[in-house]
Image (cartoon, rainbow, N blue to C red):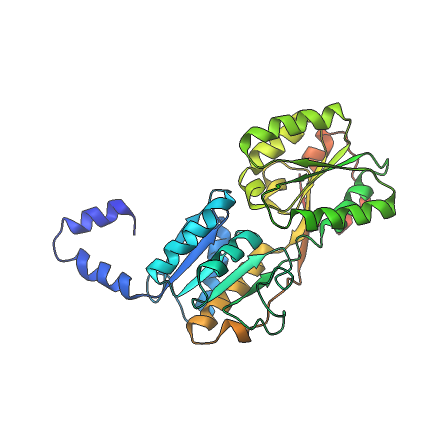
């Protein structure tokens, strides 16, 4: 209920209070988000919940909290959810959000959505048998870094020097960089690491890219970067830097190319998992999911502006070409 609507109802007397009391009785799902989740993904999550008989506002309530890309805020938000005694915590801020929720509670069920390895991070015992109060979906974001490098190699056969933009505050950044570096050695490609963890860093990063004649950029998977996608794609266009991203909303915002999992399908699956937990199933018994569908999106307008002739092979492989 919007605040303005609540005030209006409160002024009408007894009408508001039964509704408010009912809302308080509903089980609450606390969304621990790195950045605000797009409306279409929240809708996909609702669809999954609906398959288990839960409807927002009728049989379940949402409490959506965004850290605004600031990893240091995750624990405080998780503690608020614990204090509120939410029924389930749904983390969408990657490994850092899942770790913060785990450190805040060992009893409230946690469903994570992350790109890192939950086993090596100590979140679950195994993918098949999580063995604790956590389960969720591992979207292989960091394993796909090598694939993005291969796609850039197809797009830019002259094999230019490559940059990787990472957020040093992200606990999985080293893992992603190592995967890309291993693939780069096979392709005999130079790799340079650039870091950004605040808005003030981006201008300097792209200025350095140009000075060092970096011919292409991989933007690492990161909630902070996703929240600043408009700024990043604008700087890449202004500086003439071809860049590949993990999320399709980057090409939608004017980026060149993206390759990653189908996020809509993932959120629907996670909604189903949360519904199953609300029905009484234990996270310890629900295997960690992995995506099965991936998307390649190419913005042909951006390619033309950068003077890139996209190979017919890549166009044929693309799930969507933006023209």
Q: Position of residue 26 (x, y in %)?
A: 31, 65
Q: How many marks?
A: 0
55 w.r.t. 177: above or below? below
Q: Which is more toward the observer, 75 or 303?
A: 75
Q: Quadrant of residue 245?
A: top right
Q: Which residue of the protein is positioned furthest toward the left in this rendering?
A: 13
Q: Position of residue 125 (x, y in %)?
A: 61, 70
Q: Position of residue 306 (x, y in %)?
A: 73, 29
Q: From the viewer's perspective, is 164 left or right of 44?
A: right
Q: Is residue 234 visible?
A: yes
Q: Which is more toward the observer, 141 or 243?
A: 141
Q: From the viewer's perspective, is 313 left or right of 22?
A: right
Residue at position x 17%, y 51% from top?
10
Q: Which is more toward the observer, 28 or 119?
A: 119
Residue at position x 77%, y 45% from top?
149
303 w.r.t. 208: above or below? below
């Amino acid at each position: 209920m919007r605040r303005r609507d609540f005030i209006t109802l409160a002024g009408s007397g007894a009408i508001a209070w039964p509704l408010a009391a009912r809302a308080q009785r509903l089980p609450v799902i606390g969304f621990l988000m790195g950045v605000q989740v797009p409306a279409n993904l929240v809708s996909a999550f609702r669809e999954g919940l609906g398959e288990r008989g839960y409807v927002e506002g009728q049989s379940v309530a949402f409490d959506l909290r965004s850290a605004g890309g600031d990893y240091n805020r995750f624990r405080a938000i998780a503690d608020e959810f614990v204090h509120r005694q939410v029924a389930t915590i749904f983390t969408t801020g990657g490994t850092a959000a899942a770790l913060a929720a785990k450190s805040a509670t060992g009893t409230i069920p946690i469903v994570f959505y992350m790109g890192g390895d939950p086993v090596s991070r100590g979140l679950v015992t195994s993918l098949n048998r999580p063995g604790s109060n956590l389960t969720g979906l591992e979207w292989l974001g960091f394993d796909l870094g090598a694939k993005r490098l291969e796609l850039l190699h197809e797009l830019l056969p002259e094999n230019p020097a490559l940059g990787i933009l990472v957020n040093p505050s992200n606990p999985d950044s080293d893992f992603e960089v190592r995967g890309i570096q291993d693939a780069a050695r096979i392709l005999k490609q130079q790799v340079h690491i650039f870091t950004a963890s605040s808005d003030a860093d981006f201008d300097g990063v792209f200025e350095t890219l140009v000075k060092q004649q970096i011919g292409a950029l991989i933007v690492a998977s990161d909630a902070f970067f996703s929240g600043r996608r408009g700024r990043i794609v604008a700087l890449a266009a202004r500086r003439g830097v071809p860049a590949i991203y993990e999320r399709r909303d980057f090409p939608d915002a004017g980026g060149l190319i993206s390759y990653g999992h189908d996020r809509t399908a993932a959120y629907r699956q996670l909604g189903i998992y949360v519904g199953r937990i609300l029905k009484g199933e234990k996270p310890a018994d629900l295997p960690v999911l992995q995506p099965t569908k991936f998307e390649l999106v190419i913005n042909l307008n951006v390619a033309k502006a950068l003077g890139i002739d996209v190979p017919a092979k890549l166009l044929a492989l693309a799930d969507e070409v933006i023209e």
